[in-house]
Amino acid sequence: MNTEHERIALDEAVRTCTLCPLAETRTNAVPGDGPVPARILFIGEAPGRNEDTKGVPFVGRAGSILNGLLEGIDVARDDVFITNIVKCRPPKNRDPNQEEIEACRPYLDSQLSLIRPEVIVPLGRFAMRWVLESYGIAPGPISEVHGKVFRIQTISGERVIIPVYHPAATIYRPAFREVLAADFETIRAVLDNSMAPDRLGR
């Protein structure tokens, strides 16, 4: 099976999934959006109301902010893959619980294998914690970890993890927009292989 066929099969498995109770309350499951493979993978927490309606990640206000941040570093949204840890919207946008996370884990693991990203960008504290812990890194508070560069070795080679604040945070705290823009410049630097030593994490 080629990559495109695998991606289609995986998306269909997500859309028809009934492994946890979120299947009973969703309008649409949201597998993810973007090319396969892709250099950059953005991982959020879970779909929101707009995403649940349209079946596409980051299409509301947070999506518009993310698009602007990508434009700021000269990266087209069509060139990145965007998904979430949990593929269905939790009721009232609550945090996903452990049962829901574990039910979705195989889907995200399969996406990582297909997408083969060089850079993984967790969006927000929830995604940051999940991603870092998945690679055996103890996460600190996102206020201390955002914008740091974590280099990890995998079977398919080195990957870079750069946690950032969730774009939605800027809706309620406009000052975060400058922080996010600076962290996206770190993403640009990594992609350009010109990372300044004083910005490196572990």
Image (cartoon, grey):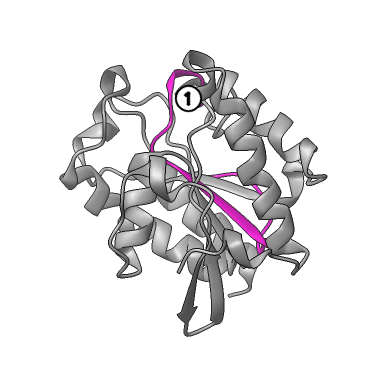
Q: Quadrant of residue 74?
A: top right
Side of 45 relative to 156 (left or right): left
Residue 146 against residue 27 in the figure, above or below: below
For the N terminus, the quadrant is bottom right
Q: Secondary structure at mark 1?
A: helix
Whether 197 is among the magenta residues is no
The residue nearer to you, when weighing 131 against 186, is 186
Percent x, y of residue 140: 31, 51
Q: Mark 1 is on which residue type?
A: Ala
Would you say residue 86 is visible in this rendering?
Answer: no
Side of 154 relative to 194 (left or right): left
Q: Quadrant of residue 95?
A: top left
The residue most toward the front is: 198
Q: Total marks drawn?
A: 1
Q: Badge 1 local density, few (<14 within 10 Å), some, or many (20+)?
A: some
Residue located at (56% from left, 33% from top): 56
Percent x, y of residue 167: 54, 30
Side of 109 relative to 115 (left or right): left
Percent x, y of residue 22: 26, 33
The residue nearer to you, when weighing 49 against 15, is 49
Name the magenta segment's main secondary structure.
Answer: loop
Residue located at (66% from left, 45% from top): 184
Would you say residue 195 is visible in this rendering?
Answer: yes
Percent x, y of residue 151: 51, 72
Whether 48 is among the magenta residues is yes
Q: Which residues are magenta?
A: 32-51
The residue nearer to you, when weighing 38 against 56, is 38
For the C terminus, the quadrant is bottom left
Residue 83 against residue 110 in the figure, above or below: above
Residue at mark 1: 169
Residue located at (21% from left, 42% from top): 20
The residue nearer to you, when weighing 172 against 135, is 172
